[in-house]
Image (cartoon, rainbow, N blue to C red):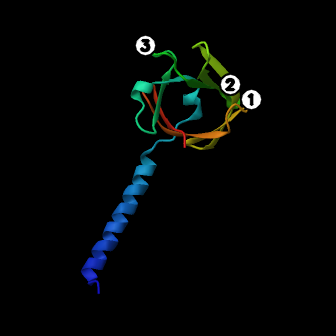
Amino acid sequence: MVSAPSRSLGLLLLLLLTATCQQRRSNRAAVNPAALQGTWLQAQEETRGDTLVYRPNTYKFGPSRGRTGFAIGTAGRFTEFDIAPTDGLIGHDGTWTALNPDHLRIHLADNSAPDYTLEIISLHHGVLKLKRP
């Protein structure tokens, strides 16, 4: 049988964990879609695990064979950039839709890839961090 102090301590720990989880989630500031507008290229050298890192195409990247990326435009316009067979970039036009403050749904018009979601982790000082679940 569990004593009352042990039960109270367990309940207190559970409440603290719950509050911490909720606090972390609320610390993620919603990114205004207008702040995302522009062309973003992947910074492979900064990508860690499943968090993808992008910088504006005006950033002075180090040498690289090629960089994938995307452009977010007004009125839901989206272009995904892949490395072309000649090492240039090939664009796939599509659309983006905000599902909520930190998720965008992407649809490519040529169906070159199935629809997917981008989870916005952060946008701070020209560094955009995303997850693509």
Query: Which residue appears farthest toward the bottom when viewing the image?
Result: 1
Per the model, the C-alpha gap separating discs 3 and 1 is 30 Å
* Type of amino acid under label 2: His
Q: Is residue 64 left or right of residue 114?
A: left
Where disc 3 sits, the SS reads loop
Q: Are marks 2 and 3 in contact (CB under 8 Å)?
A: no
Counting other residues with Cα less than 10 Å from the Cα at mark 2, is it few (<14), some (14-19), or many (20 or more)? some
- Residue 127, located in which quarter of the rendered image? top left
Q: Which of marks 3 and 1 is nearer the N terminus?
A: 3
Q: Residue at x 39, y 60 (%)?
A: 19
Q: Name the residue under label 3.
A: 63
Q: How far apart are marks 2 and 3 (CA)?
A: 24 Å
The C terminus lies in which quarter of the figure?
A: top right
Residue 120: percent from the left, percent from the top?
Answer: 52, 38
Q: Which amino acid does label 3 sit on?
A: Pro
Using a 10 Å C-alpha cutoff, classify the residue at mark 3 as few (fewer than 14 neighbours), some (14 to 19) or many (20 or more). Answer: few
Residue at left offset 54%, top offset 29% = 35
User: Which residue carries the number 1 mark?
Assistant: 110
Classed neighbour count for the residue bearing mark 1: other residues with Cα under 10 Å, few (<14), some (14–19), many (≥20): few
- Residue behind mark 2: 92
Amino acid tagged 1: Asp
The answer to the question of whether label 1 and label 2 lie on touching residues, with beta carbons closer than 8 A, is yes
> What is the residue that sits farthest to the front in this orientation?
85
Residue 117 screen position, x and y as percent? 60, 41
